[in-house]
C-alpha cells in the first residue's frame, strides 16, 4: 500500500549558492513541456494499475516546480485524477515564479498547500544566498496563495551570511505577520561542491556558527509558539490543523513512492514486490522487510530506457529501529504500540535499555496523549537530536 506520492521537478531558474540538490538551472520551455508530459504519462500508467488508490497525500517538489507554470497545473490535475483518495496536495514554489494566476489555477486543479522557499525577509541575505526573489516578492507570493484559498508553508533558513540576531528576529516576525499557518526552520549547511563551499575554501566566507544557529532555533521556537504555531516535528511549526500530513508520513513509517530522478521511495516488502516490475526496480533478498530506493536516471517507469535505482534493504529489526528514530523527531514521540512492536522485533532488553538511557540523560520523557502513554523528546532532546536519534538507530545493529 502506497500512502504518499512524491514527484520531483528537477528545474530551477538558477541554482542557489548553497544548493546541492539534484536540480539544474533551466529556462527551456520545451524541456518543461517534455518533462511534465512524461510525468503525466507515468501517472497514467501507475493509475491504471490501482497502485495509487491508497495514497492520501501528494507532494510535488524540486527543484522549483513553479517554474513549470501552466505545465505544473496540468501535472497537478493528472495527480488528482490518478489519486482518488487524496486528502492533502502540496506544491513547492519559489516567490519569483509564483503568481496569483498560478495560485488560482493550482487551487482549481486540486492543490491544497503551497510550500514557499522564502529563506529570509532580508534582501541582502537573500542576495548572499543567490536567491532570485526579494522580501517584497515573498510577501506578495504568500498573499497570492492565501487569497487563492491555499494553505501556506514558509521555509526559513538560519545561520546564513550577513544574518544577525536582529535580522533573524525581523524575519521571524515578518513570517508570522504574513498569516501563514506553517513554518519550517533549517540551519544552513555548507555542502561540498557548492559555490558557498568554494567561498569558504577561499577564505571569503566563515563557517556557519553553531552557537548562533542554536540561538536562532531557540528564538524561532519561542516566537512561533507565542504566535500560536506549535512544533510538531523537529524543524516544523504549525497552527492547529495546519500540520503537513505528507511530511508526517515520512516520519511515521508510512510507505511513499517517489517519481523522477533523485526521487526517494520507501515501501514495505509486499508493496515493493507488487510494484517492482512496473517501476523497473530490482529484486531484493528474502529477509528484507522494507526497501528504500532512489532513482538515479532520468528515465521513468514504462519508457524505453529502464530506470536505475540505488537500493537499501532493511530487515525487520532495522525497520523497527528506524521507526523509533524517526518517531522521536515528532513532538508527540512514539506510542506504546510502536514500542511493543520494536520490543518484539529487536528484543525487550535492548529497547528498554535505550529508553532508560534517553530518560536518564533527559532526552525523553513519558507523556500522556489522548489517554495513551508516549515516549516524547524533551527540550534537550530537541536540541541534541542527533544524540537522541542515535540511541534508537543503534538498535538496528
Image (cartoon, rainbow, N blue to C red):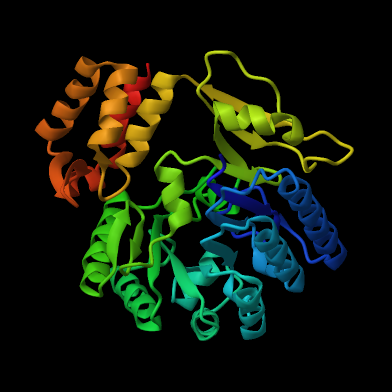
Tell me if 248 is positioned left or right of 360 in this view. Answer: right
Residue at position x 57%, y 42% in the image: 2
Q: Residue at x 47, y 19 (%)?
A: 315
Q: Relative to 56, is 51 above or below?
A: above
Q: Is residue 6 above or below residue 152?
A: above
What residue lies at 63% left-to-right and 36% top-to-bottom?
Answer: 294
Q: Quadrant of the C terminus?
A: top left
Note whether residue 341 is visible.
yes
Eyeballing the image, is 139 above or below 3? Answer: below
Residue furthest left as drawn: 360
Residue at image coords 77%, 49%: 42
Q: Is residue 15 above or below residue 143?
A: above
Camera-side residue of 248 and 167: 248
**Residue 57 locus on image (x, y percent):** 53, 55
The picture quadrant where one finds residue 186 is: bottom left
| Placement of the N terminus among the 4 image quadrants | top right
**Left or right: 284, with 187 as reference point:** right
Observer-nearest of 232 and 119: 232
Q: Residue 141: image x %, image y %? A: 55, 80
Amino acid at each position: 500500500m502506497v500512502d504518499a506520492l512524491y514527484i520531483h521537478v528537477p528545474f530551477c531558474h538558477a541554482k542557489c549558492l548553497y544548493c546541492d540538490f539534484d536540480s539544474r538551472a533551466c529556462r527551456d520551455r520545451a524541456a518543461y513541456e517534455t518533462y511534465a508530459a512524461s510525468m503525466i504519462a507515468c501517472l497514467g500508467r501507475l493509475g491504471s494499475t490501482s497502485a495509487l488508490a491508497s495514497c492520501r497525500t501528494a507532494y510535488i517538489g524540486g527543484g522549483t516546480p513553479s517554474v513549470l507554470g501552466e505545465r505544473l497545473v496540468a501535472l497537478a490535475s493528472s495527480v488528482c485524477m490518478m489519486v482518488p483518495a487524496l486528502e492533502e496536495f502540496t506544491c513547492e514554489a519559489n516567490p519569483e515564479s509564483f503568481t496569483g494566476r498560478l495560485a488560482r489555477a493550482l487551487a482549481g486543479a486540486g492543490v491544497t498547500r503551497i510550500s514557499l522557499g522564502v529563506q529570509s525577509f532580508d534582501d541582502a541575505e537573500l542576495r548572499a544566498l543567490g536567491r532570485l526573489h526579494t522580501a517584497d516578492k515573498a510577501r506578495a507570493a504568500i498573499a497570492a496563495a492565501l487569497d487563492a484559498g491555499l494553505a501556506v508553508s514558509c521555509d526559513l533558513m538560519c545561520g546564513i551570511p550577513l544574518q544577525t540576531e536582529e535580522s533573524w528576529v525581523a524575519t521571524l516576525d515578518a513570517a508570522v505577520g504574513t498569516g501563514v499557518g506553517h513554518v519550517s526552520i533549517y540551519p544552513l549547511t555548507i555542502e561540498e561542491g557548492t559555490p558557498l563551499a568554494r567561498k569558504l575554501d577561499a577564505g571569503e566566507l566563515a563557517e556557519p556558527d553553531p552557537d548562533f544557529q542554536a540561538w536562532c532555533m531557540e528564538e524561532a521556537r519561542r516566537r512561533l509558539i507565542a504566535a500560536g504555531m506549535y512544533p510538531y516535528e523537529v524543524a516544523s511549526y504549525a497552527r492547529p490543523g495546519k500540520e503537513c500530513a505528507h511530511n508526517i508520513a515520512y516520519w511515521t513509517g508510512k510507505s511513499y513512492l517517489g517519481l523522477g530522478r533523485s526521487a526517494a521511495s520507501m515501501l514495505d516488502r509486499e508493496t515493493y514486490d507488487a510494484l517492482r516490475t512496473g517501476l523497473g526496480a530490482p529484486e531484493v533478498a528474502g529477509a528484507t522487510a522494507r526497501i528504500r530506493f532512489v532513482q538515479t536516471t532520468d528515465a521513468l517507469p514504462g519508457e524505453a530506457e529502464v530506470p536505475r535505482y540505488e537500493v537499501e534493504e532493511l530487515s525487520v529489526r532495522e525497520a523497527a529501529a528506524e521507526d523509533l528514530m524517526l518517531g522521536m523527531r515528532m513532538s508527540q514521540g512514539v506510542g506504546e504500540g510502536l514500542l511493543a512492536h520494536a520490543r518484539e522485533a529487536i528484543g525487550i532488553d535492548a529497547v528498554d535499555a535505550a529508553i532508560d538511557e534517553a530518560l536518564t540523560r533527559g532526552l525523553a520523557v513519558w507523556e500522556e496523549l489522548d489517554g495513551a502513554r508516549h515516549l516524547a523528546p524533551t527540550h534537550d532532546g530537541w536540541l541534541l537530536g542527533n544524540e537522541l536519534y542515535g540511541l534508537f538507530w543503534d538498535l538496528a545493529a
